[in-house]
């Protein structure tokens, strides 16, 4: 697997391609990809999404991604790292919240612009960044940085709308670490058992449940089930994986076990959910 590094706080690239600009790869920074024109398929963590003009993707560190170009595509790439978030002129009180939101955008295939108003805002922002970056006019660097900051905040707002509403981003550090641990091990049921988590974080098993609910406003099992359901929904909507492959990925004993779990959460089987989602899906609305 190819791994890329970023040797500056942020970088901008604008390219027109007739084929995939890169094979599947990972990197240690954030990457915003905006489709100015063209069509094709985005692949992220083995999930596919049909892209078109106006779609924007956020690739987070450790994600594996690539593009398959169907028609000539103009891509805008904005790459930035934690150093930029810390020192890019953003308000200090917002930095911790922003880092949390961006990090927790993992596993979200498809366009991240869910707010229709923001879709119309992002296009001129990207065009302005490209124009300033190409022309290199007076105060160019300062203006580009302000536009980049605005774009990152707009993206964060769209992601935040789809984070679990019950979770307070500003909760104390250990509670945030538990949430990130759960998300990082969501495919390994053994590591999500209360006794395993309590040992990992040095909290008694008896106290862990009360501690988690106080900070997340729901039980740990409710949170795990909700987060796992959200990921399974994305697999059903955006990937070509068979139901039994999804069951295996998330550590269910078999397809029947997944069916029982998913029906309890969503009131219908995974197959029924996939069929309905695909019937309703139109790329222009995502």
Image (tube, rainbow, N blue to C red):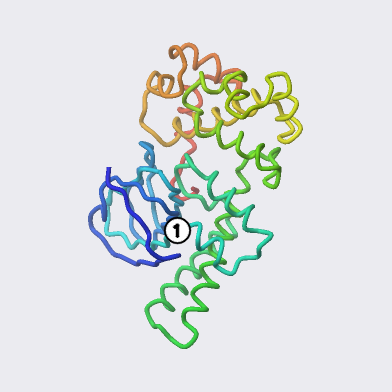
Image: 101 above or below 236: below
Residue 189 locus on image (x, y percent): 51, 20
Q: Is disc 1 placed on a helix, strand or loop? A: loop
Residue 32 locus on image (x, y percent): 44, 57
Q: Nearer the viewer, residue 11 or 263?
A: 11
Neighbourhood count class around disc 1 (C-alpha, 10 Å): few under 14, some 14–19, many 20 upward: some
Q: Nearer the viewer, residue 18 or 152?
A: 152
Picture residue at 47% right of the left edge, 23% below the top: 188
The reply, left or right, for residue 134 in relation to residue 257 is: left
Residue 227 locus on image (x, y percent): 57, 31
Quarter-wise, where is residue 24 in the image?
top left
Picture residue at 56% right of the left edge, 61% below the top: 86
Image: 207 above or below 158: above
Quarter-wise, where is residue 53 in the image?
bottom left
List the single residue furthest toward the front.
202
The reply, left or right, for residue 81 in relation to residue 67 is: right
Picture residue at 52% right of the left edge, 22% below the top: 191
Image: 35 above or below 100: below
The reply, left or right, for residue 213 in relation to residue 185 is: right
Q: Nearer the viewer, residue 66 or 201?
A: 201
List the single residue furthest toward the bottom.
138
Residue 59 locus on image (x, y percent): 43, 50
Residue corresponding to mark 1? 54
Image: 119 above or below 41: below
Picture residue at 39% right of the left edge, 18% below the top: 244
Q: Nearer the viewer, residue 262 or 211?
A: 211
């Amino acid at each position: 697997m190819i791994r890329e590094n970023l040797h500056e706080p942020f970088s901008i690239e604008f390219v027109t391609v007739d084929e995939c600009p890169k094979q599947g790869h990972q990197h240690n920074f954030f990457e915003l990809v905006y489709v100015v024109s063209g069509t094709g398929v985005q692949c992220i963590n083995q999930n596919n999404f049909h892209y078109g003009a106006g779609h924007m993707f956020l690739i987070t560190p450790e994600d594996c991604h690539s593009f398959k170009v169907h028609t000539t595509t103009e891509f805008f790439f904005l790459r930035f790292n934690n150093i930029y978030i810390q020192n890019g002129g953003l308000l200090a009180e917002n930095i911790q919240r922003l880092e949390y939101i961006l990090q927790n955008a993992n596993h979200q295939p498809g366009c991240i612009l869910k707010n229709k108003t923001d879709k119309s805002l992002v296009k001129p922002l990207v065009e302005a960044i490209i124009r300033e970056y190409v022309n290199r006019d007076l105060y160019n660097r300062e203006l580009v940085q302000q536009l980049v900051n605005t774009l990152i905040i707009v993206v964060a707002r769209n992601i935040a709308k789809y984070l679990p509403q019950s979770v307070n981003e500003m909760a104390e550090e250990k509670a945030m670490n538990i949430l990130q641990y759960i998300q990082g091990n969501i495919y390994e049921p053994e590591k999500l058992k209360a006794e395993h988590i309590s040992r990992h974080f040095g909290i008694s098993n008896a106290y862990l449940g009360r501690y988690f609910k106080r900070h997340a406003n729901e039980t740990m099992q409710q949170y795990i089930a909700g987060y796992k359901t959200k990921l399974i929904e994305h697999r059903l909507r955006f990937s070509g994986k068979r139901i039994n492959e999804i069951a295996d990925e998330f550590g269910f004993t078999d397809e029947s076990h997944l069916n029982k779990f998913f029906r309890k959460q969503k009131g219908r089987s995974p197959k029924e959910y996939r069929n309905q989602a695909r019937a309703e899906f139109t790329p222009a609305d995502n």
